[in-house]
Image: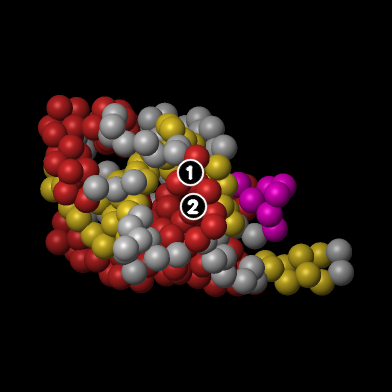
Amino acid sequence: MTKTNKALVIGAHPDDCALGAAGLSVLLRKSGWHVTFLTMTDGELGGDPQLRLDEERISASILDVGLDFGHLPDGSMAGRQTVEVLEAKLELHQPNLILTHAPTDSHADHRVLSDSLVSAARRNASVLFFEGPSTLQFGASLKIDIAGVWDLKVQSLLAHASQRERVRTVEWAEAAGRHRAWPHYQGVCEAFAPVRMDLSLMVEMAAQMTMPVNTVKHTGNKTTPRAWSVV
Ligand SMILES: [Zn+2]
Protein backbone atom coordinates (compact mmCIF):
# COMPACT_ATOMS: atom_id res chain seq x y z
CA MET A 1 0.00 0.00 0.00
CA THR A 2 1.42 3.38 -0.94
CA LYS A 3 1.60 5.97 1.81
CA THR A 4 -0.26 9.25 1.57
CA ASN A 5 1.85 12.35 1.97
CA LYS A 6 0.55 14.94 4.40
CA ALA A 7 1.16 18.68 4.48
CA LEU A 8 0.32 20.80 7.52
CA VAL A 9 0.05 24.54 6.80
CA ILE A 10 0.13 26.54 10.04
CA GLY A 11 -1.01 30.15 10.33
CA ALA A 12 -1.51 32.40 13.35
CA HIS A 13 -4.88 33.80 12.20
CA PRO A 14 -7.73 32.88 9.87
CA ASP A 15 -6.58 33.79 6.28
CA ASP A 16 -2.81 33.43 6.94
CA CYS A 17 -2.59 29.90 5.48
CA ALA A 18 -4.46 30.90 2.32
CA LEU A 19 -2.34 34.03 1.88
CA GLY A 20 0.91 32.10 2.11
CA ALA A 21 0.18 28.75 0.54
CA ALA A 22 -3.30 28.39 -1.01
CA GLY A 23 -1.85 27.70 -4.45
CA LEU A 24 0.66 25.06 -3.34
CA SER A 25 -2.04 23.48 -1.16
CA VAL A 26 -4.40 23.04 -4.12
CA LEU A 27 -1.60 21.64 -6.28
CA LEU A 28 -0.73 19.13 -3.55
CA ARG A 29 -4.39 18.14 -3.12
CA LYS A 30 -4.67 17.54 -6.86
CA SER A 31 -1.58 15.31 -6.53
CA GLY A 32 -3.25 13.13 -3.90
CA TRP A 33 -1.78 14.70 -0.78
CA HIS A 34 -3.69 15.30 2.43
CA VAL A 35 -3.45 19.00 3.28
CA THR A 36 -4.61 20.53 6.57
CA PHE A 37 -4.70 24.19 7.57
CA LEU A 38 -3.97 24.64 11.28
CA THR A 39 -5.08 28.08 12.46
CA MET A 40 -3.63 28.85 15.86
CA THR A 41 -5.98 31.63 17.06
CA ASP A 42 -9.62 32.50 16.43
CA GLY A 43 -8.62 35.95 15.14
CA GLU A 44 -10.74 37.77 17.71
CA LEU A 45 -8.69 40.99 17.49
CA GLY A 46 -9.67 41.28 13.83
CA GLY A 47 -13.42 40.80 14.24
CA ASP A 48 -16.09 38.48 15.56
CA PRO A 49 -14.25 35.19 16.20
CA GLN A 50 -17.21 33.00 15.26
CA LEU A 51 -17.51 34.80 11.93
CA ARG A 52 -13.79 34.51 11.33
CA LEU A 53 -13.78 30.76 12.01
CA ASP A 54 -16.77 30.35 9.68
CA GLU A 55 -14.90 32.28 6.99
CA GLU A 56 -11.88 30.01 7.50
CA ARG A 57 -14.12 26.95 7.05
CA ILE A 58 -15.51 28.33 3.77
CA SER A 59 -12.02 29.23 2.58
CA ALA A 60 -10.70 25.73 3.40
CA SER A 61 -13.63 24.07 1.63
CA ILE A 62 -12.91 26.10 -1.53
CA LEU A 63 -9.35 24.76 -1.46
CA ASP A 64 -10.50 21.24 -0.50
CA VAL A 65 -8.17 21.12 2.52
CA GLY A 66 -8.80 19.93 6.06
CA LEU A 67 -8.94 22.30 9.00
CA ASP A 68 -7.81 22.34 12.62
CA PHE A 69 -7.63 25.09 15.24
CA GLY A 70 -5.29 25.87 18.13
CA HIS A 71 -7.65 28.35 19.88
CA LEU A 72 -4.75 30.34 21.36
CA PRO A 73 -5.30 34.02 22.31
CA ASP A 74 -5.06 36.39 19.34
CA GLY A 75 -2.38 39.01 19.88
CA SER A 76 -0.74 37.35 22.85
CA MET A 77 0.56 34.00 21.65
CA ALA A 78 3.30 32.89 24.03
CA GLY A 79 6.26 30.70 23.21
CA ARG A 80 6.00 27.80 25.64
CA GLN A 81 2.23 27.33 25.26
CA THR A 82 2.53 27.60 21.48
CA VAL A 83 5.29 24.97 21.35
CA GLU A 84 3.15 22.62 23.45
CA VAL A 85 0.11 23.02 21.20
CA LEU A 86 2.25 22.57 18.09
CA GLU A 87 3.89 19.41 19.44
CA ALA A 88 0.46 17.91 20.12
CA LYS A 89 -0.79 18.88 16.64
CA LEU A 90 2.30 17.46 14.93
CA GLU A 91 1.79 14.21 16.84
CA LEU A 92 -1.87 14.19 15.77
CA HIS A 93 -1.39 15.01 12.08
CA GLN A 94 1.99 13.32 11.41
CA PRO A 95 2.86 15.62 8.49
CA ASN A 96 5.89 15.03 6.29
CA LEU A 97 5.79 18.63 5.04
CA ILE A 98 5.17 21.62 7.34
CA LEU A 99 4.70 25.25 6.31
CA THR A 100 4.42 28.34 8.47
CA HIS A 101 5.26 32.07 8.72
CA ALA A 102 8.81 33.31 8.24
CA PRO A 103 10.42 34.58 11.47
CA THR A 104 11.10 38.06 10.07
CA ASP A 105 7.61 39.53 10.36
CA SER A 106 6.16 42.71 11.84
CA HIS A 107 3.31 40.79 13.53
CA ALA A 108 4.28 39.44 16.97
CA ASP A 109 2.01 36.37 16.71
CA HIS A 110 3.65 35.41 13.41
CA ARG A 111 7.12 35.68 14.95
CA VAL A 112 6.14 33.62 18.00
CA LEU A 113 4.55 30.95 15.83
CA SER A 114 7.54 30.76 13.49
CA ASP A 115 10.06 30.42 16.33
CA SER A 116 7.85 27.94 18.20
CA LEU A 117 7.40 25.79 15.11
CA VAL A 118 11.13 25.55 14.53
CA SER A 119 11.41 24.12 18.05
CA ALA A 120 8.35 21.87 17.86
CA ALA A 121 9.29 20.49 14.43
CA ARG A 122 12.89 19.72 15.32
CA ARG A 123 12.34 16.06 14.35
CA ASN A 124 10.56 16.83 11.07
CA ALA A 125 12.68 16.66 7.93
CA SER A 126 10.82 19.16 5.75
CA VAL A 127 9.86 22.62 7.02
CA LEU A 128 9.19 25.62 4.79
CA PHE A 129 8.44 29.25 5.57
CA PHE A 130 5.79 31.10 3.57
CA GLU A 131 5.32 34.85 3.24
CA GLY A 132 2.43 37.24 3.87
CA PRO A 133 1.63 40.96 3.84
CA SER A 134 3.55 41.59 7.09
CA THR A 135 6.67 39.58 6.17
CA LEU A 136 9.89 41.62 6.27
CA GLN A 137 13.04 40.08 4.76
CA PHE A 138 12.33 36.79 2.98
CA GLY A 139 14.79 34.44 1.29
CA ALA A 140 12.44 33.19 -1.42
CA SER A 141 14.48 30.27 -2.76
CA LEU A 142 11.66 27.91 -3.79
CA LYS A 143 9.00 29.05 -6.24
CA ILE A 144 5.94 27.36 -7.64
CA ASP A 145 3.82 28.53 -10.55
CA ILE A 146 0.23 28.80 -9.29
CA ALA A 147 -1.29 30.51 -12.35
CA GLY A 148 -3.42 27.44 -13.10
CA VAL A 149 -5.06 27.55 -9.65
CA TRP A 150 -5.00 31.32 -9.14
CA ASP A 151 -8.79 31.62 -9.30
CA LEU A 152 -9.11 29.27 -6.32
CA LYS A 153 -6.59 31.29 -4.31
CA VAL A 154 -8.57 34.47 -4.98
CA GLN A 155 -11.85 32.79 -4.01
CA SER A 156 -10.32 31.46 -0.79
CA LEU A 157 -9.15 34.97 0.13
CA LEU A 158 -12.48 36.58 -0.76
CA ALA A 159 -14.14 34.08 1.61
CA HIS A 160 -12.58 36.14 4.42
CA ALA A 161 -15.05 38.91 3.68
CA SER A 162 -14.71 40.56 7.10
CA GLN A 163 -11.02 41.25 6.41
CA ARG A 164 -11.31 42.85 2.98
CA GLU A 165 -11.34 46.39 4.38
CA ARG A 166 -8.59 45.74 6.95
CA VAL A 167 -6.12 43.91 4.73
CA ARG A 168 -6.29 44.06 0.95
CA THR A 169 -5.45 40.39 0.72
CA VAL A 170 -6.14 39.78 -2.97
CA GLU A 171 -4.14 42.85 -3.95
CA TRP A 172 -1.20 41.67 -1.85
CA ALA A 173 -1.40 38.13 -3.26
CA GLU A 174 -1.44 39.49 -6.80
CA ALA A 175 1.48 41.87 -6.20
CA ALA A 176 3.57 39.25 -4.40
CA GLY A 177 2.65 36.56 -6.92
CA ARG A 178 3.68 38.66 -9.89
CA HIS A 179 6.88 39.76 -8.13
CA ARG A 180 7.82 36.18 -7.30
CA ALA A 181 7.09 35.04 -10.85
CA TRP A 182 9.64 37.49 -12.24
CA PRO A 183 11.68 36.64 -14.31
CA HIS A 184 11.15 32.89 -14.53
CA TYR A 185 7.38 32.65 -15.03
CA GLN A 186 4.79 34.79 -16.76
CA GLY A 187 1.91 34.35 -14.34
CA VAL A 188 1.82 34.15 -10.56
CA CYS A 189 4.01 32.25 -8.14
CA GLU A 190 4.08 31.43 -4.47
CA ALA A 191 7.51 31.48 -2.89
CA PHE A 192 8.92 29.57 0.05
CA ALA A 193 12.08 29.57 2.14
CA PRO A 194 13.19 26.18 3.43
CA VAL A 195 14.31 25.70 7.00
CA ARG A 196 15.27 22.28 5.69
CA MET A 197 13.81 20.10 2.96
CA ASP A 198 14.06 16.37 2.40
CA LEU A 199 15.31 16.24 -1.18
CA SER A 200 13.67 12.85 -1.83
CA LEU A 201 10.30 14.36 -0.80
CA MET A 202 10.88 17.27 -3.17
CA VAL A 203 11.60 14.85 -6.03
CA GLU A 204 8.47 12.88 -5.13
CA MET A 205 6.38 16.07 -5.04
CA ALA A 206 7.67 17.13 -8.43
CA ALA A 207 6.93 13.72 -9.93
CA GLN A 208 3.38 13.61 -8.50
CA MET A 209 2.42 17.15 -9.29
CA THR A 210 0.23 17.49 -12.34
CA MET A 211 0.34 21.19 -13.06
CA PRO A 212 -2.92 22.60 -14.39
CA VAL A 213 -2.58 24.16 -17.82
CA ASN A 214 -1.05 27.59 -17.44
CA THR A 215 -3.60 30.15 -18.55
CA VAL A 216 -1.13 32.75 -19.82
CA LYS A 217 -2.10 33.86 -23.30
CA HIS A 218 0.63 34.89 -25.74
CA THR A 219 -0.25 37.69 -28.12
CA GLY A 220 2.77 38.67 -30.15
CA ASN A 221 5.31 40.32 -27.88
CA LYS A 222 2.71 40.98 -25.21
CA THR A 223 1.58 38.40 -22.70
CA THR A 224 -1.78 38.67 -20.98
CA PRO A 225 -2.13 36.44 -17.95
CA ARG A 226 -5.81 35.53 -17.99
CA ALA A 227 -5.52 34.74 -14.29
CA TRP A 228 -5.49 38.45 -13.50
CA SER A 229 -8.88 39.01 -15.01
CA VAL A 230 -10.64 37.84 -11.85
CA VAL A 231 -9.31 40.68 -9.70
ZN1 LIG B 1 -1.84 36.66 10.80
Q: Nearer the viewer, residue 161 or 71?
A: 71
Q: Local crowd at mark 1 within 10 Å, few (<14), some, or many (≥20)?
A: few
Q: Is residue 38 above or below residue 100?
A: below
Asked if 34 appears above or below 215 in the picture, the reply is above
Residue 198, given in percent of the width and then of the height, sits at 44, 39
Residue, far right: 220
Q: Is residue 78 left or right of residue 148?
A: left
- Describe the element under mark 1 as helix, strand or loop: helix
**Who's the residue at 45% across and 37% down the image?**
197
Q: Amino acid at mark 2?
A: Glu
Which quarter of the figure has residue 218?
A: bottom right
* x and y, in percent, of residue 40 in the image: 21, 46
Main SS, magenta residues:
loop
Q: Which residues are magenta?
A: 180-186
* Coordinates of residue 135 in the picture (x, y in percent): 44, 37
Write down the residue under mark 1: 200
Q: Amino acid at mark 1?
A: Ser
Residue at the image position 57 percent from the left and 70 percent from the top: 212
Q: Please indicate whether residue 45 sits to the left or right of residue 159 in the image.
A: left
Query: In the rendered structure, are the residues bearing label 1 and label 2 in contact, judged by CB atoms less than 8 Å apart?
Result: yes
The residue that appears at 64% across and 51% down in the rendered structure is 181
Q: Which mark is residue 204?
A: 2
Q: In this view of the protein, which residue sits in the foreground, 98 or 152?
A: 98
Q: Quadrant of the C terminus?
A: bottom right
Residue 86 makes an appearance in the image: yes
Residue 182 is inside the magenta segment:
yes
